[in-house]
Amino acid sequence: MRLPCPICGERDRREFYYQGAAVALNRPAPDADADAWQDFVYLRENLPGDHQELWSHDAGCGAWLVVTRNTVTHAVLGAKLASEADR
Amino acid sequence: MANTLTLTATSPCYGLLPKTVGTCTLTETDLGTLTSVAPFKGRAVSDALKGAHGMAFPAPNRATGKDGARAIWFGRDMVLLAGPVPDPGLGDHAALTDQSDAWTCVTLSGEDAGAVLARLVPVDLRPAIFKQGHTARTQLGHMNASITRTGPDSFLILVFRSMAATLVHDLVTAMESLAARH
Ligand SMILES: [Zn+2]
């Protein structure tokens, strides 16, 4: 598997570390209720199809990426910097 | 009479290099002062770098300058200035951090240098793709590394200082296995 880092270009999977579903970027407000925090910390959709995933380019530029990957075909459909991703 | 103790600094690859195997030679490279240059948010540092040290701030995956004074792209929003002591004026535009003792710096040269690295590095380093002045942050074996092409058959390789012996071991093993095939 290869991931297209927006800074370094297409790179081997071993340079990256998986950091979880990209919903981690959608942090609730500090005063949000317990249900919102329960959702954020514990609940994940796990449907087959396109997923937004966080990967860090540990052995490359160090950037965190949002990668769109299809969990059925394993096709990697794109990547952008987490700092520039839609929230 | 007081006893005087004299301590002599040793380089990361002291006692390990140089080594020549087959067509390849691995030498330790003293790059001089190493400084990470991380521009403050929204600040352009290229003019200041050019004025002070004669080279532009390199784009990602590129190195500028030449032997003795190089700027090597070193990661997101970071460049390694290798050679000169940084001009204090650069500190107005970027965070400067001394890295001189933190890195092992070696040069791998020779006809088979690219083939040796192809056994250890998951990046296409062939000369048509990875040209002089190109650099990459990637892995060499299991180590995070910075690799820069400095000539048709030569590469500058940096890993953390603590990994000097592993770097030499991995490279020399690849040099030997390649030489054995000739
Ligand atoms: Zn990258």
Image (cartoon, coloured by chain):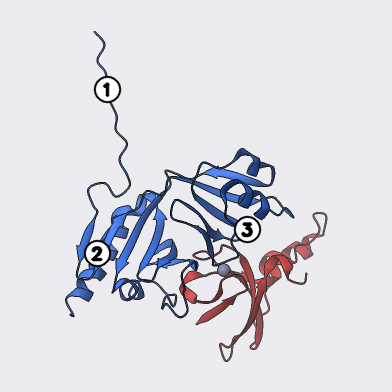
Q: Amino acid at mark 1?
A: Leu
Under tag 3, what secondary structure? loop
* Residue that badge 2 annotates: B172
Q: Earlier in the sequence, mark 1 or mark 2?
A: 1
Label 1 lies in ligand 1 vicinity (Cβ under 8 Å): no
Cα distance in 3D space between marks 1 and 2: 36 Å
**Residue B46 location, quadrant:** bottom right
- The residue pinned by badge 3 equals B77
Mark number displayed over residue B146: none
**Marks 2/3: CA–CA distance:** 33 Å
Chain B hue?
Answer: blue
- Between B144 and B7, the one lying in front of the other is B7
Residue type at mark 3: give it: Asp
Which type of secondary structure does the marked residue at label 2 adopt? helix
Mark number displayed over residue B5 = 1
Residue A68 in the image, given as x and y percentages of width and height: 65, 81
Q: Which tint is chain A?
A: red
